[in-house]
Image (cartoon, rainbow, N blue to C red):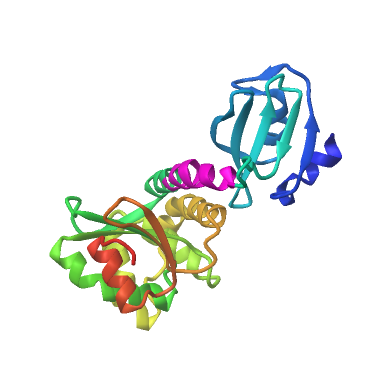
């Protein structure tokens, strides 16, 4: 049992069979709890057939579909195909996983530690992981400034410290400042001259928040800054890494649907 569970994160598309007792752990069958205990996370559950319950879990940023038998003694990991050859697993993931994951990600971004750039009444909200030493973060902010100044877009800078040894102290100084937005703008205006000067008392206050943001960045699998999250006109979540080209920039700032 333990040997099979260890293989679970790499078994998407395989035909893996697990066995379990019938007892429940919390709201999930014990067999599902065994899998969750291995570090996977629950995203959604559904009725696959009248006799089979399906669960969509996430491992290393990817969805895995697990099907549990009616007696809760067996679980199958793989693809659910009907008699006509249709991939029902893919349809379910499209319908349940991606919307649920987008909602979860947006909530995590909102709960992170960020500096608001522009008015709270802005129609469009955009989150961006921002390292104080990142030249592309600086370029993105400059490109977005017309929409920020007009009040159409609020850019929420999630301060991280990942690029250089001075990144974390600078980010912490910004978040720990009495006026984080003023401190952020100081880094913007002085970026070519080295950015904001680290203030020890502010750094101490802000460092736990920056470390939490670093962890969120890692959890979401964002490998570079700026890591930008935005929604289109239909409310669908999109992510862009790095400085966006003009076409993509207009799409995200205007909240238009991706082509």
Q: Is residue 130 visible?
A: no
Q: Position of residue 180 (x, y in %)?
A: 31, 57
Residue located at (55% from left, 70% from top): 165
Above or below: residue 206 compared with residue 33: below
Q: At 72% across and 19% down in the image, what residue appears?
A: 71
Q: Would you place residue 118 above or below residue 5 in this image?
A: below
Residue sitting at 37 percent across and 71 percent down?
Answer: 196
Query: In terms of image quadrants, where is residue 201?
Result: bottom left
Image quarter where the C terminus lies is bottom left
How far across and how far down the image is residue 60, in percent? Answer: 63, 52
Q: Nearer the viewer, residue 160 or 174?
A: 160
Of residues 161 and 98, the one drawn nearer to the viewer in this rendering = 98
53 vs 209, left or right, is right
Query: Is residue 229 something one can see in this rendering?
Result: yes
The residue lying toward the viewer, choosing from 109 and 188, is 109
Question: Image quadrant for the N terminus?
Answer: top right
124 left or right, relative to 91: left
Q: Is residue 148 left or right of residue 77?
A: left
Task: Give above or below for 164 relative to 85.
Answer: below
> Is residue 101 a member of the stretch shown in magenta?
yes
The residue segment tinted magenta is 86-102
Q: Is residue 208 above or below residue 41?
A: below
Asked if residue 195 lies in the magenta stretch, the reply is no
As drawn, the residue found furthest toward the bottom would be 192
Q: Main secondary structure of the magenta part?
A: helix
Where residue 59 sits in the image (x, y, percent)? Answer: 64, 47
In the current view of this chain or complex, which residue is farthest to the left?
150
Instruction: Give whichever of 145, 172 is nearer the camera.
Output: 145
Q: Is residue 99 left or right of residue 253?
A: right
């Amino acid at each position: 049992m333990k040997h099979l569970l260890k293989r679970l994160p790499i078994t998407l598309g395989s035909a893996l069979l697990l066995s379990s007792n019938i007892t429940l752990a919390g709201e999930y069958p014990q067999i599902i709890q065994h899998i969750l205990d291995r570090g996977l996370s629950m995203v959604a559950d559904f009725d696959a057939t009248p006799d089979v319950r399906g669960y969509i879990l996430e491992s290393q940023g990817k969805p895995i579909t697990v099907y549990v038998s009616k007696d809760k003694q067996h679980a199958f990991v793989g693809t659910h195909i009907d008699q006509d050859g249709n991939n029902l697993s893919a349809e379910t993931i499209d319908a349940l996983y991606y919307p649920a994951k987008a909602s979860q990600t947006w909530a995590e971004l909102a709960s992170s530690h960020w500096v608001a750039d522009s008015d709270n009444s802005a129609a469009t909200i955009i989150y961006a992981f921002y390292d104080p030493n990142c030249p592309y973060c600086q370029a993105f902010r400059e490109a977005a400034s017309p929409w920020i100044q007009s009040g159409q877009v609020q850019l929420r800078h999630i301060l991280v410290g990942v690029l250089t040894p001075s990144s974390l102290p600078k980010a912490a100084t910004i978040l720990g400042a009495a006026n984080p937005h003023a401190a952020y703008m100081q880094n913007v205006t002085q970026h070519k001259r080295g950015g904001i000067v680290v203030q020890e008392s502010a750094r101490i206050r802000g460092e736990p928040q920056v470390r939490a943001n670093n962890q969120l960045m890692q959890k979401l699998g964002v490998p570079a800054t700026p890591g930008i999250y935005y929604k289109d006109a239909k409310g669908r979540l999109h992510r862009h890494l790095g400085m966006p080209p003009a076409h993509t920039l207009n799409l995200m700032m205007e909240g238009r649907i991706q082509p």
